[in-house]
């Protein structure tokens, strides 16, 4: 499913604290001034730029630390190894293959990507302030698109929470059921996993291309998983050992030194 959003649809879902953090603004009066400038800037973007979302709902099962989807495609996950961490993996929130095979249970997983028109990153390069304002608002709009998409998924497209009735404020602090861990974030730190997701999603449908490391262009793009398990929680993978690195490289089908580069911050 491909969805296009006008800026006016996304503005109520912008998570402003992250915007202020990016500017390194802490003073309340400065935040208010910056907020007003951002709102005025958004007014100039209305009708000229849009955000785009891509979503795919798949039957899925877990097999160890892998999530298996259509045509036996494996999405390798990583597991916490530090003492006291809880030893969690995102694969824990998908029904095990062995359980499903014995009881005919089914499970599902959502894959998603959101982005903005490339012009938001290229059309303001002549003015340093406007360039930064456009880039940071583009980041917020891509995240807001993920928020709106996730709401549609929970209530309609997947429909596992059809009676959800949360305020936007509650959504922005993640009071909904399920999670949407994003690639490059603490529980999915390997940006090259975007290549696996792209094989399934075909991100170019919404204008996303991948660099050699799996980073997305436009920069204001988000990709990841949607998991519905009621006990699913976000977590930080933390440090992993050489044993898991080797196992992950095997499951990714990549040389260990390539995976070592992708996971350098977690070793």
Image (cartoon, rainbow, N blue to C red):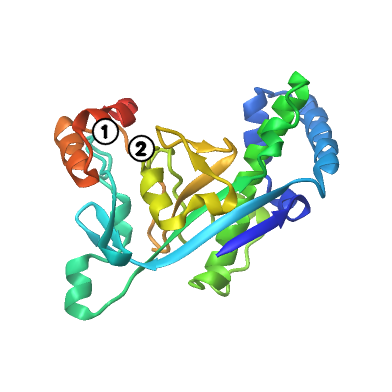
Q: Is residue 49 above or below residue 151?
A: above
Classify mark 2: helix, strand or loop. Answer: loop
Q: Residues within 10 Å of mark 2 (few under 14, many from 20)?
A: many
Q: Earlier in the sequence, mark 1 or mark 2?
A: 2
Q: State the quadrant of the N terminus.
A: bottom right
Q: Which residue is mark 1?
A: 259
The residue shown at (56%, 42%) is 221
Q: Is residue 155 shown left or right of residue 9?
A: left
Residue 86, can we see it? Answer: yes
Q: Nearer the viewer, residue 142 or 240?
A: 142
Asked whether the beta carbons under mark 1 and mark 2 sit within 8 Å of each other, the answer is: yes
Q: Is residue 12 above or below residue 33?
A: below
Residue 120 image position (x, y, % from top left): 70, 37
Residue 94 image position (x, y, % from top left): 31, 62
Q: Is residue 132 above or below residue 180?
A: above
Q: Quadrant of residue 193?
A: top left
Q: Nearer the viewer, residue 257 or 40?
A: 257
Q: State the quadrant of the C terminus.
A: top left
Residue 199 image position (x, y, % from top left): 39, 53
Residue 179 image position (x, y, % from top left): 46, 55
Q: Is residue 201 shown left or right of residue 9?
A: left
The residue shown at (43%, 50%) is 198
Q: Nearer the viewer, residue 87 or 65?
A: 65
The residue shown at (57%, 72%) is 156
Q: Which residue is mark 2?
A: 190
Q: Is residue 102 shown left or right of residue 7?
A: left
Classify mark 1: helix, strand or loop. Answer: helix
Label tally: 2
Mark 1 → mark 2, Cα distance in angstroms: 8 Å
Residue 176, can we see it? Answer: no
């Amino acid at each position: 499913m491909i969805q296009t959003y006008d800026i006016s649809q996304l503005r109520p879902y912008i998570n402003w604290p992250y915007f202020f953090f990016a500017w390194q603004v802490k003073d309340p009066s400065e935040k208010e001034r910056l907020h007003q400038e951002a709102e005025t800037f958004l007014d100039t973007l209305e009708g000229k730029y849009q955000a785009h979302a891509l979503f795919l709902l798949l039957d899925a099962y877990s097999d160890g630390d892998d999530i298996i989807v259509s045509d036996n495609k494996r999405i390798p996950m990583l597991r916490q190894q530090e003492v006291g961490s809880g030893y969690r993996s995102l694969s824990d929130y998908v029904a095990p293959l062995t359980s499903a095979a014995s009881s005919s249970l089914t499970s599902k997983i959502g894959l998603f990507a959101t982005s903005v028109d490339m012009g938001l990153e290229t059309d303001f390069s002549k003015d340093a302030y406007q360039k930064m304002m456009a880039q940071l608002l583009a980041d917020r709009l891509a995240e807001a698109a993920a928020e709106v998409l996730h709401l549609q998924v929970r209530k309609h497209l997947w429909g596992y929470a059809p009676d959800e009735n949360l305020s936007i404020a509650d959504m922005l602090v993640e009071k909904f059921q399920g999670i949407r861990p994003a690639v490059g974030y603490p529980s999915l730190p390997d940006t090259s996993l975007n290549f696996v997701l792209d094989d399934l999603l075909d991100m170019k449908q919404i204008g996303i291309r991948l660099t050699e490391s799996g980073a997305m262009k436009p920069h204001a793009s988000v990709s990841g998983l949607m998991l519905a398990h009621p006990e699913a929680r976000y977590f930080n993978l933390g440090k992993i050992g050489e044993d898991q690195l080797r196992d992950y490289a095997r499951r990714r089908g990549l040389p260990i030194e390539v995976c070592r580069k992708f996971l350098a911050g977690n070793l």
